Amino acid sequence: MTKLFCLIPLILCFSVFAQKSDGDREMNQPVEPFKIIGNVYYVGASDVTSYLITTPEGHILIDGGFEETVPQIRANVTKLGFKLEDIKILLINHAHYDHCGGLAEIKKLTKARLYASPPDASVLEDGGMSDFRFGGDKPLFTPVKPDEILKDGQEIRLGGSVLKTYFTFGHTKGATSWTTEVTENGRKFTVAFVSSLTTLDYALTNNPKYPQIAADFTKTFAALSRIKADVLLSSHGGFFDLTEKSAKIRAGAKPNPFIGAAEYQGFIKRMEKAFQDKLKAEKASKK
Ligand SMILES: [Zn+2]
């Protein structure tokens, strides 16, 4: 996987909230929505992801994509036979414009309640201006105010579904992941919605804007390693071969190509190694 995800390169001179590069547009191509497993559906774009968890009492949506992803999410939810207005809860894996840019609009359309971790909540509220790396004196996306501030370990319940919250800080100061249990063909599976875990061009040592960044990443990888997940989902399709797996699932592949505990653990290990290698290199270069 050679692609760089999330905000690299970030071109700061673009006008208000539009997608900022060809890379952004490439990540935001329309794709057919589909059922991933149990009551979890894919409603996002080609690479920036959005997940719908459906229940008899309304639905949960994880991530709003770019501002330009909203019409796709809306069309995808409808195509699957659900109603956008039935979305009651909005969640966000981390407050960067390729995942939260659409939240303000989706919130308006659905009147759903937005939940966010304390650090990401303040970044969402100021449109990214206080982001430790990309913030500045202009908003990077339409500001959106969360209705509920999450706690680590909090269980979000709706219509019989439970999402467990994991604070997985590092990629942003408030990056957040969830797990949920689903049933398919009479078997139970744990689905993990993992936040971005990349370190981009961040300084991991002596970072005055985020002094505890390395400690946060370390805690994040420890927490994620303890999860026994059967299905890996994440903020960018490239992290878990979304394109390939969705092609298989549409072709009716059995068993479900999204099921794979080893893949979840392998992903967490790979991301942790990339973080550790970068941290070591940084420490060595500063000696
Ligand atoms: Zn990001």
Image (spheres, grey):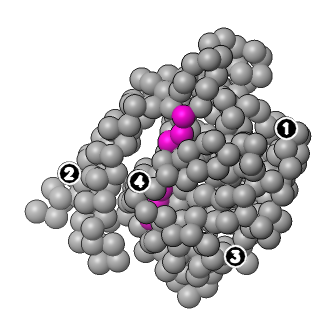
Between the C-alphas of marks 4 and 3, the distance is: 28 Å
> In this view, which residue lies farthest toward the left?
287
Specify the amino acid type for callout 3. Thr
Q: Amino acid at mark 1?
A: Leu
Instruction: Give the mark nearer the N terminus: 1 vs 2.
Output: 1
Which residues lie in the magenta part? 174-181
Residue matched to label 1? 80
Contact, mark 4 vs mark 2 (Cβ under 8 Å): no
Check the image and report above or below for 76 versus 7: above
Mark toward the start of the polypeptide (4 vs 2): 4
Farthest residue, direction bottom: 137
Residue at figure coordinates x 29%, y 78% from the top left: 208
Residue 124 is labelled as none
Label number found at residue 142: 3
Q: Is residue 121 magenta?
A: no
Residue type pointed to by label 2? Lys
Q: What residue is disc 2 on?
A: 280
Question: Do the residues under discs 4 and 3 have CB atoms within 8 angstroms?
Answer: no
Q: Residue at x 58, y 59 (%)?
A: 92
Count of marks overlaid on the render = 4
Q: Residue at x 68, y 51 (%)?
A: 60
Q: CA distance from mark 4 to mark 2?
A: 30 Å
Q: Which mark is residue 153?
A: 4
